[in-house]
Image: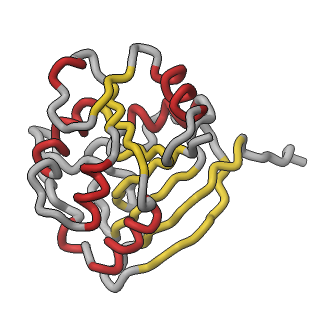
Amino acid sequence: MRRLKVIEHISLDGVIQHSVDESFPYGGWFAPYMTPEGGAAVLEAQGERFDLILGRRTHDEWSTAWGQAPRGPMADRLHAATKHVVTHRPDDLAWRPAVALGPDLVADVRRLQAQDGPDLVVWGSSTLTSVLLEHGLVDELVLVTYPVLLGAGRRLFADGAPAQALDVVSTTSTPSGVTVTRYRVRGPVPTTPAP
């Protein structure tokens, strides 16, 4: 049985968008806060061996950014991972090894989780994350939280994200104020009836 982890770089107000477009001028907002300590904490949370589940946009952006990156602990692990890509264009997946997931994301992820193999890691997709949480497929959520408020941009948890209770597994702080917090997904949010 394979565990599924979601790892996200996130602002204090929940923004995960990194790329600049007409409504988001803050590309690279996380770079000034990166430290060796933060990189080591992310590598530890991610694990030595894993496969990736990526949305198409993330796959395409990363195939350029990481596909040409020099060797190093992060680049080597990403290159070695099988990339399971949610896409309608399976014939042009440039970053290998890559496998296209079919039209039923939930069934495909359940099938992957039932197989033997390394953990599955999701990076960079608020759409995928919401669906996976809604269907109870996420085992661990790793938030790399930066001390910045962006006010606009794609957010990890959009309106309508499923309510979930989480347990803190560990928290690491870096000299630049970034925290890397690992959460285990517990399940439904416990409530107490109002008196």
Query: Viewed as shown, does residue 154 lie left or right of 156?
Result: left
On screen, 173 above or below 90?
below
Q: Quadrant of the N terminus?
A: top right
Query: Viewed as shown, does residue 137 lie left or right of 156?
Result: right
**Which residue corresponds to the image point at 37% horizontal and 42% vertical from the top-left?**
52
User: Which residue occupies the foreground of this view, 84 or 134?
Assistant: 84
**Which residue corresponds to the image point at 64% horizontal and 54% vertical from the top-left?**
166
User: Which residue occupies the foreground of this view, 36 or 69?
Assistant: 69
User: Which residue occupies the foreground of this view, 90 or 143?
Assistant: 90
**Which residue corresponds to the image point at 39% horizontal and 63% vertical from the top-left?**
144
Residue sitting at the far right? 195
Residue sitting at the far front? 116
Image spot of residue 176 (x, y percent):
30, 81
Residue sitting at the far bottom? 175
Image spot of residue 122 (x, y percent):
41, 44
Callout count: 0
Image spot of residue 130 (x, y percent):
48, 34
Write down the quadrant of residue 72 in the picture: bottom left
User: Which residue occupies the foreground of this view, 158 or 117?
Assistant: 117
On screen, 101 above or below 160?
above
Write down the quadrant of residue 148 in the picture: bottom left
**Which residue corresponds to the image point at 45% horizontal and 38% vertical from the top-left?**
129
Image spot of residue 33 (x, y percent):
25, 74
